[in-house]
Every structure is written in C-alpha cells, then in structure tokens.
Image (cartoon, grey):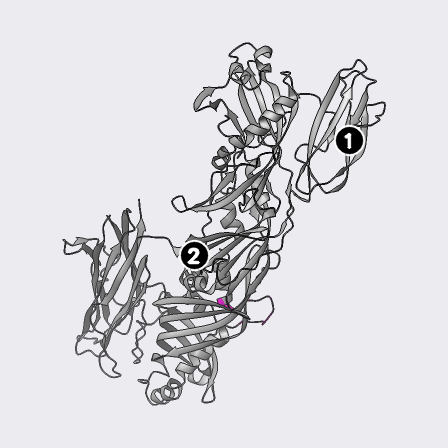
Amino acid sequence: MVAAIALFILAGCNPRIITSPGDGTIAAEGTLTVSGSIPDSYAPGGTLTVDGVAVSYDSEGNWSTDITVSGYGTTQVVEAIYTEPGGTAHRQRQAVVAGPSLGEGQYSENGVGMRFTNDALTNLGPIINDLAGSSFDISGLILAQDPLIDTELSGINVKGSAYEAGAGGVNLGVASAADGVNVNVSIADLYLGLNLNLGSILGNCKLEVVVPSTSISARFDLKPAAGNENYVDVNMIGAPTVTTANVDYEFISGVCDPSTPVVGSIVNALAGDSIPGTIGDGFSTQLADPDGSGPLDSPIADAIETALSEISIAGSVGDAVQAQLDAPFTTISETTGGIEFRANADFRSVVGAGAGECLPAPGSPHIANTFDTPSSYPTLGSTTPSGDPYGLGLVISNSAFNQLLGVMTACGLLNQDIEQIDFGGDLLTIDSSVLSIIIPAFATALPAATPMFIRVDPAYSPFLDGDAGPSGEMAELTLADLHIQFVQPTDDGDVVWLTLGVDAPLGIDMAFDPVAGALAPTITPPVAGTVAVRVLDNKVGANETGVEALFAGLFPNFVSGLSDSFAAFPLPAFLGLQLNVVEMARQGNSFVLYADLDLAPQTRLENVVVSDTSTADYSKDATLFDSWEWRHRLRKQVSSSNVAVQLKGMMGADACCTVDDEKDSATASGRVNFDVVPAEGETWRIDLNHMIQGAHTHNDEGYRARTRISTVTGRYRIGSGAWVNFNFNPSQMDTGERSGNYHGPFSGSAATSITGTTAQNVTVEFSFWVEAHSINSVWFPAKDGSEAALRFGVNDSLTNNFTAGDYPGMGNRDVAADGYRLNIAVSNVG
C-alpha cells in the first residue's frame, strides 16, 4: 500500500487539447465555455469531440464550445478526443469543480471572528495595561495634560500643570455592556507635583499631592478603525468619573505655603479645602474626549487603543499556520455578555522563511481560487453548545478554512514522492516488478526491477462544501482531481508512465492535542463506492477499466496517511495568554473553537515588601536664623516580573549669620524583600541595577558652601546567605569648599545578576549618605554662609528665600529625571 497518499496533479506529459479551463478551475454552475486547439504534432484533418459531441475547429486548429456545469461541490470531467485521419486517437480529460469560488485577493465575508466573554475580560485588564506600554503610563498621561487644573477658588482663577507624576500601581478592569465597554482604572499611591498659577498678584505655588486611591471610570465604544480596519478604534462615551480618597497635600513654596508670612496661612486655608475636588475635576476634564464623537480621542481611549492593537485576528491566526491573513474587522459588538469581533478573511501564501511565510516544496501548485461555501455567521452564546462556560470563542467559516487549505496546499503540504509501499505488512521499495503485481503492464513495458516512485501532486486544494462527513464526522473534506503519477527516474529526466485522477469525499474531525497545544485533524476514509478514479495518461498501456476499478477500491486504504500530511494546526496566542480548549464545535458552515484564556506558567516575583530605612525628614525653616532641611520620598511599582524603586531627596543648609556654620547630613536607604518562584523546570535570572542622578548646588550668599555624597552601596543575599555587594561611586562625591554659585551634576550606576532553579527568598538593600554644609566667615569681612543643597529629585520646602534646593533651579534640572532608582527584573533563561 502507498504509505501516505495525498492530493495529486496531472503533469501534462502529452500536448493539451483543452487549454481552458485550466487545472484547478472552480466554475459556477451553469454554462461554461471550454476552448483549446489541436496540437501541431497531431495529423491534421481529424475529428474532435467534447463530451461525445462533435466540435468544429478553424484553420488554425482553434476551437470552443459551451457545456453545462452542475452538481454543487462535485467534480465534472470534460473529455476531449481528437482522432487523426489514420484512426489514432488522442484524449485529454480535464476536471472542473462545480460551485462558487473565491479568487486571489477576494475576502471570505465574515470568514473569521472571535468573542471575548466578560469572564475573559476580567482577566485581561492587567494584560491590556502591560500591552499599552508607555501609552498607558499614568505619569505620561498626566504630564501631557496642560493645564491639568483650570478652575476658580474663592474668586481666584487657578491653573495648574504637573511637573512630576507617578503611581505605585495601576490596575485596569474591563467589562462589556449593552451600550459600550466599561473600563475602570484603579490607581494606587498616585503622586503629583504641581505648579499652580494664582494670577499676577499672588503668583505661583508649588503643590505636592499624594492620593492613596484613585478610581477613573469611563465607558467606551469600539469599532473598526476607519482606513485600517484590521485594528480597533476606541472612543470614550461621555466624560470619565474620577473618585479620589484620602488626598494628602502640601504646599512647599510660594504664597500658598503656610510658612509664608501674613498671607500664606490664609491662601492655604482657602485653597486647601478645595484640593481633593479640584484634583478630581481636573482629571475628569482633561481625560475626557476632546471632541465627543469626532476624530480626536481621549488620552485613556488612546492608551486602550494602543493595547487593543494587539487584538488582531490577522496576526495571531496567520502566524500560527504560516499564512498571511488579511482580516479587516466588519463589526465590533458590545453586549452584556462580552465583545464580539467579526472580520472578513483572505488567507494567502507568501514565499519566505519569516512569520506567516512558507518555502514551497518542489512542484507545489499555484492555487488560483478556493471553494466558497455559503454560510451565515454563527451565534455564540454565553456557554458552549454543550453548556460549558468559556472565555474566548474563535470562528472560522468553511470558506475561510478552504482558503487556509489553499495556502497550505500551495506551500507543499501534500506534495510528496513515495519510494516504498506496504504489501501485507512488508515495506517494499517501489520498482517496475513491484508495480506489476497490481498493474501487470509494468512487467512488459519496462525491464524487471526498473527503479520507480509514485509522485503525489495536488491540482486543487481540498475543500469543505458544507456537508457532514460521510460517516458522521464534523464535515466532509472533498479531494478533487487528485493526481497520482507512476514515475521512472532517468539521467535525462523523469518519465511518467501512468497518471491517475482521483475524486473522493473524506471525513474530517478536529480534536485538541493538549501535549502539542494544537488542533489535530483526523481524516477518515471515504465510504466504499464513493471514490472515482480515471486514467489521465497511459504510456504504460495499462488496462484502464481494470486500473480505475482497482484504485477505486484501494484508495480508502491509503487515506490514513492524510492525517499525518495535514499535521496539526497550531493554536494562536492572544495577548500572551494560552488557549485552553474547552470545546470544538461545528455550527452551521463554521468551526468554532471555545477556549479559556490562561496565563502561561512563568517565573514570577511574590510577597514583595519595600521598606524605607532612610533618616526621617527634618527641617528648620527660619527667617532670621539658620535653616536646614532633609526631605525625601520613596516610591515603588511592583508587578509579578519587576520591582521599581525610586528614592528622591534633597539635603539643604543655609547659615544665615556669621556666628557659626550650618552642616547637616542624612542617610538615604531602603530594603526590598521578595520570593522568586520559578516555572517548573526553568532557570530564573534576577537582574539588579541601580543608578543615581542629581546635582551639587551652591547659591552665593556670602562666603562658601560644600556638599558631599558617599559611595552608593548595593547588596543582595539569597535566604540567610552571605551578602554580595554591587556598589558604585557617584561621578562627583565632594565639591570641597567653594565660593560663588556652583552647579555640579553627578551620576553613577552598577548592575549585577543572580540565577537559580529553585524557589528562593531574596533581600536587596541600598544605602548612601548625603551632607550639606553652609560655611560662614567670622573674620573681616564677615560673611554669611552660602546656600548648600544636594538635590536628587525633590524640591525643598523652605520659604526663607532658600533657592538652592528648588527645581528646575540652577542647571535647569528635570525633577522627574533626577533621583536614585533600583530596578529588579525576573526572567527565564532556560
């Protein structure tokens, strides 16, 4: 028996009498014009019949006639016979499949689709947030809004813009409703640095705000993006609702600072009570859609749109099956149960080794059209047809599946040369003697043991016509005009001795292979008596009636190899989540895969605790005497794969008088403790890196100033093991005693990594020391000390005209960029 018979194509060894239709033609039912010409190698003056009817030809040998094509989904054979005057007859049999078709570049209408249930959407919030990247960076969203606040307080017009913003964490929840998609953004530990303008009389204030809990709720409408329907356009419906809780704020400079003489406490009292509401109103106004239903988007809609750009049927499905898929969305519907995306489909092959490309096997056919099976898009409910809940439903119509089969066929899926056949359990190498056992003509046409092989080539791709399988399978898979060539290899090229054409209705079922993570098709043989075989080329001189009857009976035994030829259809990944198949069903003329979206097992960080072990803030804000301040803020962002810590601070000193110096210092330090939990069998890697950026700043007010920063220590240990250091020295650690104004930037960094294979507890610590020294002179001429500040990302809050600690200040520094940062990232390395 042949090891694995697949699809076949006629090589065309003899001159063609029929030139149109060509191989692989699918013709609509009705009238079809058949045409051709009498080959020059045939003796002129003979007679031509097409399907037994005499047809005339002109002086050039050209001819045409009309035939009737009928029998939806069946193969109709057109037979042309030219008989020379001497009686020699030449025959060509040309197959045509009856039915509708899709040509290259044509879409299968609503050929693919997907439905996310609300259960799945609940789990997608963090994924969408990650995919949005910088577009959903809450810091970037806030800093981009200018002004963030535009309101009136006690008759005073107040405008505020943020110079610094960030959050400890952002969680996004998504739920579909009948009139849109509800999105709730929960922000933990939101912090803002605001420049407030209170008009020309009162001037400017700096305000720092910390909001432990902020909720932004909004509703959005999803639709295909105009001009690029492969992607999703997101528009906000109405204005967002912003809720803040336990707003903590501090005016740190300007007339609003309560330390400002006379008016400070008054303005602070007037403005302070309005801060929580003003912050919320500012968010609501500035994060709303700027032009309603117009082309402009709200900042949140833009961010979600960036994330949803990853929801592209074309990319996910196309890459999985090595095909190019153009799938523009036709409709996006929101319901109380979920969101449904429908798209037209055009699968096509592209030669290459990249994603969605293939390298065709030698002799692979060009598939110009595929069978178009009429269908209606199926209705997907809240459960599978068997009543089970699911997260994602994927739909592919028969027509789109036929396009996919066309791509796979053009890529050489079914092309093969068979050199051995199985006879009664014995695997025999094919030669003329072996073939003569089933086709005696090979014994007389060729010497014994002449090397031979069987070539399998498709002219058509297999297709689904909408019928159920012949033995109750999910669907019927039709093989049309499959060509088997019996070939002798020679030094001068291959010689084809016999070509057969086969039509067969097979059964196909789809099952999920959990080990391979793929859909594995099962191909079942045709029912006895349903296989049609015809001889197309008979150079060997075989008994055609006998060969056709023999192979019609043998072919069902060859079909078992087709499942291997089809291999498996890899399941696409969506948004980095695994598909856990719940059910595979046929609904109408579509296949529907119901699955849950599960996070892939991955190495992760758990039980993360970030501690601030720095010197507590202290200050003395004096008008007539020495002033000093140590001020710092520690921020953190924690996820399962990353911990980001920022410690920002300012150490300042100002000796007002000639009596004595003012020198102050503090320690900036912190600790991070966490568990690293590896995925099974994986080696994990923890990358640790820390850096600092800031400046020494001296403001000339008399004599001298000096600022210092120590070595920045970093160390880690696993469990209770030994500490391992990764320290660095900032680029300028000590200014020395200096007179006049001075701006001295400093920076530095260090990195290391840890690897392991088992769960471990890890502790990371960092520490450095800062000092500011304002130096006076008691000798003639006596001078006050100059302002001394060491800045790394925080403004001072002193109001006695101390400016060395202000941002942007000397050197026009960026308060958001300055600071100490520690980043801890986990990854798999094998």
Find residue 172 and report its image quarter. bottom left
Give the residues in magenta: 289-300
Q: Residue at x 46, y 79 (%)?
A: 281
Asked if 135 appears above or below 498 in the picture, the reply is below
Percent across and percent down for residue 584 are: 48, 51
Q: CA distance from mark 1 to mark 2?
A: 54 Å
Look at label 2 and name its amino acid. Answer: Asp
Measuring 52% from the left and 46% from the top, which residue is drawn there?
318
Q: Nearer the viewer, residue 827 or 584?
A: 584
Q: What is the number of the mark on residue 310? A: none
Residue 349: x and y, percent? Answer: 57, 40
Judged from the image, the secondary structure of the residue bearing numbered disc 1 is strand
Q: Position of residue 253 (x, y in %)?
A: 34, 79
Q: Nearer the viewer, residue 469 or 298?
A: 469
Identify which residue, 626 or 342, lies in the foreground. 342
Residue that mark 1 sits on: 35
